[in-house]
Every structure is written in C-alpha cells, then in structure tokens.
Image: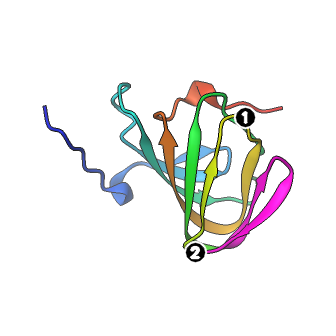
Amino acid sequence: MSKYLVAQLDEIEEIRCSCGITRRAFVEDKDQSATLHLLDVQRDSRVHYHKKLTEIYFILEGKGYLELDGERVNVKPMTGVMIKPGCRHRAVGDLRVAIVAIPAFDPEDEWFD
C-alpha cells in the first residue's frame, strides 16, 4: 500500500454542503487522518458546528468574512483560520476556500442549532 495519496480536485464531483459547493478529497478511506475540501461559498450558507472536527480554512480567492461564534472576521486571499470543535461558523462572500478537516470529514459530525 502506498504511503501517499494524490487528488485532482477539479476532477472530483461537486456536492452541496452547508456553506456552498464543495469537492472533497481523501474521503473514500474511512481511516484517513484528514481530508481536503475545495469550497465555493454560496449566498445561503448556514451556521453549523462540529463536535469532533477541527477545520483549517485557507482563503484562495475573493473577499468576505467568516462568522465565528457570532463574531465577524474579515478574510481575503492568504488568510488562514483554524476553527476548533464547537465553534459555530459559516463563510459569507464571494470566496473560494481550501479546507483541511482533522480528523477526516464525517458527515455525521455536522450540527445545526
């Protein structure tokens, strides 16, 4: 078994998520320690949180803000933000974001108030 994985994100199928449209890499193997997501934020993003998941957002393109536990944090390209478990959050604006999810993304660990 190889000690590395490669993903071509522009070849991964888009899916709808709470913040917009995403492509998720490395989700097939349930034993992965992390996953990589490419998110295009949509206007109707929803505040949500994770009980176990830490997410690192890296802004690739656009301007907007992250809503983090009710606080507005302006973001632009090259901004990095670590979102810890329990932090209510959503992205707002015309943004393209790379997200590293640790541990690997689990759709059962997405919660809404």
Horizontal arrangement in the rendering, residue 8 relative to residue 47 (left or right): left
Instruction: Answer above or below: position of 110 versus 5.
Output: above
Instruction: Name the amino acid, label 1.
Output: Gly
Horizontal arrangement in the rendering, residue 37 relative to residue 76 (left or right): left
Instruction: Answer above or below: position of 47 versus 76.
Output: above
Q: Which residue is drawn at 77% across and 33% down?
A: 112
Disc 2, SS = loop
- Select label 2 or label 1 by which is in front: 1
Magenta part of the chain: 63-77
Inspect the magenta stretch and tell me whether residue 82 lies in it: no
Q: Which residue is drawn at 64% across and 53% down?
A: 20
The residue identified by callout 1 is 86
Horizontal and vertical percent position of residue 4: 21, 43
Instruction: Name the amino acid, label 2.
Output: Pro
Q: Residue at x 63, y 67 (%)?
A: 95
The residue identified by callout 2 is 77
Q: Nearer the viewer, residue 70 or 16?
A: 70
Disc 1, SS = loop
